[in-house]
Image (cartoon, rainbow, N blue to C red):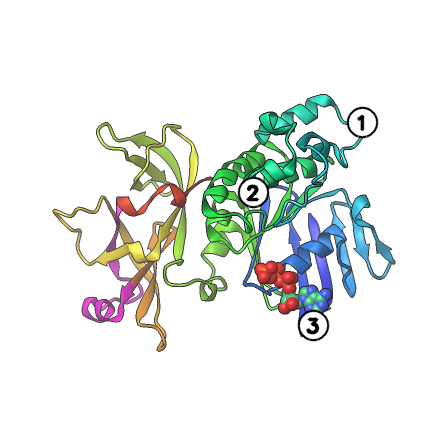
Amino acid sequence: MLSINVKRQLGETLLDVDVALPLQGVSAVFGRSGAGKTSLVNILGGLATPDSGEVKLGDRWLYHSGKHINLPPEKRNAGFVFQDARLFPHYRVRGNLNYGRKGAKSAKQFDSIVQLLGLEHLLERYPTSLSGGEKQRVAIGRALLTSPEILLMDEPLASLDLPRKRELLPYLQRLTRELNLPIVYVSHSLDEILQLADQMLVIDKGKAVICGPLETVWDSAELRPWLSQQEQSSLLLATVAETHPDYAMTRLQLENGASLWVNKTLRDRGERIRVRVHSNQVSVCTEKPVGSSIRNVLPVTVEQINASDDSDYVQLRLQLSGMPLWANITRWSLDELALKPGSAMFAQIKGVSLTEADLAHS
Ligand SMILES: Nc1ncnc2c1ncn2[C@@H]1O[C@H](COP(=O)(O)OP(=O)(O)OP(=O)(O)O)[C@@H](O)[C@H]1O
């Protein structure tokens, strides 16, 4: 585990976090601007010192105020990737990659990281000739070549425009799948977190609001206040079952056996997938609709109705045989359908609303 129990006064905000993150997969640190995400990751990397507390990586203390332990960054065995690549302009890509490379590491490791990040054809170039996404790939390569025990990434896509984000994301996905390296990944983008994270820590005003497996945090009441109506969604776990013979659509088998058609051709049968279903794209009917254009009609039970006076819509938490599915409906619909907890309904989800950005490897 990466055990973090630290306090640090940041201007008017007290960063006060006590969590343990598993040393496998990607732990996303999510929160609003100014929540304390960068301060936390800087503390983990030794770039900032807490006022008190402890940080333990596996069985090694990185910081312990009581024992007066505070390892400098270079002794922490942590790779760091920042928002901006921070490459040395006077070194070629090869030189940047070699910087900080542990002497004993083999040429084989260098080649495999260069290949993983698609840097082969860039090795002799200088940073000024690289795109933002290419620079970040070099920065990631440089961090990996220090053979870190953990990789700390502070919004590595934040400074890139949308096309460059799209270009870099698949490399990050490959890296997280192919390297057995725990990653702490700071982001305020749920799109990135959906694609990359296994765990999620939510920080608000310096405090850890919730921390746990991605699906649990995604469904939690603690996360909901952070999300706009458009961002509200459910995460369903599924397996690729079959592609449609005539249309570019794929049937996913949900964990409870139900089917979901999505607007993408996925050929890896049996592949495990996470599906994000936007709450605005889920409607409910009291009877099974006939003659509907909507491809996904699933029997559900109303579990919870969240209505607040300051909101013009109502959030329904539905039970889809053991899986939570959220729907946003109007108050008018709520009243007219006389919905109550326990009501048996049919949920409708448009196949066309489930696109590539909503699907992630699980
Ligand atoms: N050394 C410092 N002295 C005083 N205040 C600080 C210091 N470092 C950070 N802060 C303040 O602490 C708060 C948290 O900052 P931090 O950069 O960690 O937030 P963040 O969640 O990473 O934000 P963003 O998403 O905008 O990068 C901010 O209000 C910031 O101004």
In the rendered image, residue 120 lying in the magenta stretch gets the answer no
**Is the residue marked by circle 1 packed among few (<14), some (14-19), or many (20+) residues within 10 Å?**
few
- Amino acid type at mark 3: Gly
Residue at mark 2 to residue at mark 3: CA–CA distance: 32 Å
Residue 264, x across and y down, in percent:
32, 36
- Secondary structure beneath dot 2 equals helix
**Is the residue marked by circle 3 packed among few (<14), some (14-19), or many (20+) residues within 10 Å?**
few
Locate residue 343 relative to residue 223 in the image: left or right.
left
Residue at mark 2 to residue at mark 1: CA–CA distance: 30 Å
Ranked by sequence position, the earlier of labels 1 and 3 is: 3
- Secondary structure beneath dot 3 equals loop
- Secondary structure beneath dot 1 equals loop
**Residue at the outermost left position:** 291
In the rendered image, residue 348 lying in the magenta stretch gets the answer yes
Residue identifier under label 3: 11
**Is the residue marked by circle 2 packed among few (<14), some (14-19), or many (20+) residues within 10 Å?**
some
Figure quadrant, ligand 1: bottom right
Disc 2 or disc 1, which is closer to the eye?
Answer: 2
**Residue at the outermost bottom position:** 309
Rendered image: mark on residue 104: 1
Q: Which residue is found at the position 59% from the left and 47% from the top?
A: 156
Locate residue 244 relative to residue 135 in the image: left or right.
left
Residues in magenta, as a range? 329-351
Residue identifier under label 2: 132
Instruction: Please give the count of numbered marks on the rendered protein.
Output: 3
Q: Are marks 1 and 3 in contact (CB under 8 Å)?
A: no
Pick the front one: 81 or 311: 81
